[in-house]
Image (cartoon, rainbow, N blue to C red):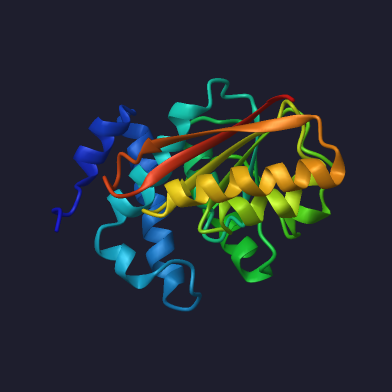
Amino acid sequence: MSSVLSRESCQNILDVSRETIETCDIYLNELIKWQKNLNLVGLSTLHDPWRRHILDCGQVARYIEDKNEEIIDVGSGAGLPGVILSILGFSNVSMVESDYKKTVFISEVLRKCKVTGNVLNKRIETFDNFLNKTLVFRAFASIEKTLKLLCDKLELSTKLIFLKGKNAINEKKNALKTWEELKIKYDYKIAPIIKTYTSISDKDSFLVTVEFKKD
C-alpha cells in the first residue's frame, strides 16, 4: 500500500502556490466537518485525502488549456472535481448535483474557500446541448452509459473528461462499440476519440478524455 500523501507533496506534484494549497486545506477541513452528518465521500478516502481528493481532482487541470473555458462538473457530489478546479483558478465552473443537501455543502465550501462557481441543483440530462463545453465526471456512470445518456446533446466542440478506475480500458472498448450502434440508429455525424492516461494519484486508475471528430 502506498504511503499517505502529504500536503507538501501534493503541492509539489500539482505545482501550485502556497495560497492555493492553503485553500485546498480549507476545503478538506469543511469536507471532514460536513461528512459527519452528510455522506459526501467514502470514509476510507479521508485517511489519505490529499491523494484521493486534491491530487486526483487537481490532475484534471492538465487537460484543460483555457482557464476561462466553460466547465461542467457532472454529478458533483462533494464538489469534486469542480471546487478544486475553481480553487486552481478556473473561472467558469458549474457544479451540477441533483441532491439538494450536497448543493448546500458545495455553495458553503465555495464561500469558505472564497472562490466562485455556479451551483446547479438539477440533472445533467435536462441541459439542451454542450456546445463549446468541457464536462468532467468523477464517480458518475460508465463511459458507455454516459454517452447513451447524453448522445443527443454532444457536439463537435464538446469535450468529456472522466476519472476512472482499473476498468477504464474495458469501458473505452464498450463505449466505442456503443457509439457505432448509436450512430447507425440516430445517423450521428460525429465520432468520439477516446484516450486513456495513467492517473497521477493511483497507478491502477486512469484519466480518460473524449473528444469528437467529423464522421
Residue 72 locus on image (x, y percent) = 65, 42
Q: Quadrant of residue 203?
A: top left
Query: What residue do we see at 33% from left, 54% from top?
Result: 52
- Between 154 and 185, the one lying in front of the other is 185
Q: Position of residue 146 (x, y in %)?
A: 65, 52
Q: Residue at 43% across / 46% down in the picture? A: 169
Quadrant (top left, top right, bottom left, bottom right) of the N terminus: bottom left
Task: Report the front residue among 13 and 131.
Answer: 131
Q: Position of residue 148 (x, y in %)?
A: 72, 53
Let me know if residue 188 appears in the view.
yes
Q: Residue at x 78, y 41 (%)?
A: 183
- Residue at position x 39%, y 44% from top? 206
Where the C terminus falls, by quadrant? top right
- In the displayed structure, would residue 147 be above or below residue 101? above
Is residue 168 placed above or below 140 in the rendered structure? Answer: above
Spot the residue most to the bottom. 37
Q: Is residue 146 left or right of residue 172?
A: right
Asked whether residue 119 is in view, the answer is no
Tally of marks: 0
Residue 39 in the figure: left or right of residue 187: left
Q: Nearer the viewer, residue 78 or 215?
A: 215
Q: Would residue 59 be found to the left or right of residue 191 on screen?
A: left
Vertical side of 1 occupied by 17: above or below? above
